[in-house]
Amino acid sequence: MQIAAWNVNSLKVRLPQVLDWLAANPVDALCLQELKMTDEVFPLAAIQEAGYHAVFSGQKTYNGVAVLSRLPVRDVVCGIPGYEDPQKRVIAVTLDSPQGDVRLVNAYCPNGQAVDSDKYVYKLGWYAAFTEYLKNTLAASPRMAVLGDYNIAPDDRDVHDPAKWAGDILVSPPERAAFQALLDLGLSDSFRLFEQPEKIFSWWDYRQFAFRRNAGLRIDHILLSAPLASTCTASIVDKAPRKLEQPSDHAPVVATLAL
DNA sequence: ATGGTCGTGTTACGA
């Protein structure tokens, strides 16, 4: 089984790239973030023609998440139960796998803008609620994967220039502590289960030729509960779509499970 | 050097 996550920064603009990518990478499930569209205009027909089911939680202009899956999904939960939030950032599903159910939680975590901003306060509060939600989900569904754009680079290895970024948004100690709290639930960063080349990132700013300079951060992650981590045979970032014309600023991340 | 480039939807805002 292969599961993937990709912040597409507008599904309207990126739909052709998503369909091309799925044709070349027929993963079992693809979690999308930043749809930037309402549910009324979600391109369901095109995705079904590509052989995928889809569930989605969109909104106008900002945010929006979807799960595309080869298998039917059930028990769809949108948002963080008990945490009121007009921003559509989370959708969870259960994959009906022949090798047993897998719970997928797809998240577009807040960016935070700057460490002295209201959005930073929102980000840390959101992470506290998300952590509690994942704790409860994990108790009910031991085979859980959490995929998406975390907007946190967990370690200096995940930053192209750690000295330049020190203390900034996406790397600040409170944000890294919030990420560590997820790991402390018993989750593993699938990417770090394996030896990896240096300077692997998943996001590059559109400005200043950041991609050409590989001036990026690794902020898109696939976290796995212990029963799934023990089945994981690979976890990679696919830089190829970032090289295309009119790319998303994020690259897809993919984990392979021996299921 | 506080810039720059996207996407959405207006001429600002979020990332």
Image (cartoon, coloured by chain):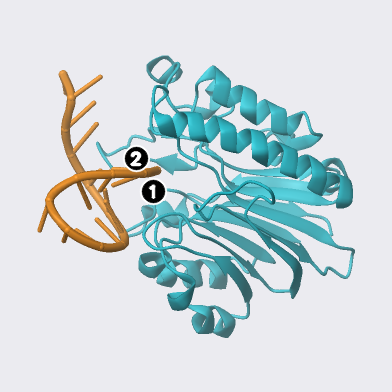
- Figure quadrant of the C terminus of chain A: bottom right
Marks 2/1: CA–CA distance: 6 Å
Secondary element under disc 1, as helix, strand or loop, is loop
Q: Which chain is cyan?
A: A
Q: Chain of mark 1?
A: A
- Disc number for residue A249: 1
Instruction: Compare marks 2 and 1 and give the one earlier in the sequence.
Output: 2
Q: Are marks 2 and 1 on the same chain?
A: yes
- Disc number for residue A35: none
Report whether A224 appears left or right of A22.
right
Report whether A92 appears left or right of A22.
right
**Residue at the spot 77% in from the left edge and 48% down from the top edge:** A233
Q: Which chain is orange?
A: B
> CB of mark 2 within 8 Å of CB of mark 1?
yes
- In this rendering, the answer to whether A216 lies above or below B7 is above
Asked if residue A223 shows in the view, the reply is: yes
Q: Which residue is mark 2?
A: A205
Q: Chain of mark 2?
A: A
**Dot 1 crowding, Cα within 10 Å, few <14, some 14–19, many 20+:** many
**Residue at the spot 50% in from the left edge and 53% down from the top edge:** A86
Look at label 2 and name its amino acid.
Asp
**Dot 2 crowding, Cα within 10 Å, few <14, some 14–19, many 20+:** some
- In this rendering, the answer to whether A45 lies above or below A14 is below
**Residue at the spot 53% in from the left edge and 38% down from the top edge:** A219
- In this rendering, the answer to whether A251 lies above or below A186 is below
Look at label 1 and name its amino acid.
Asp
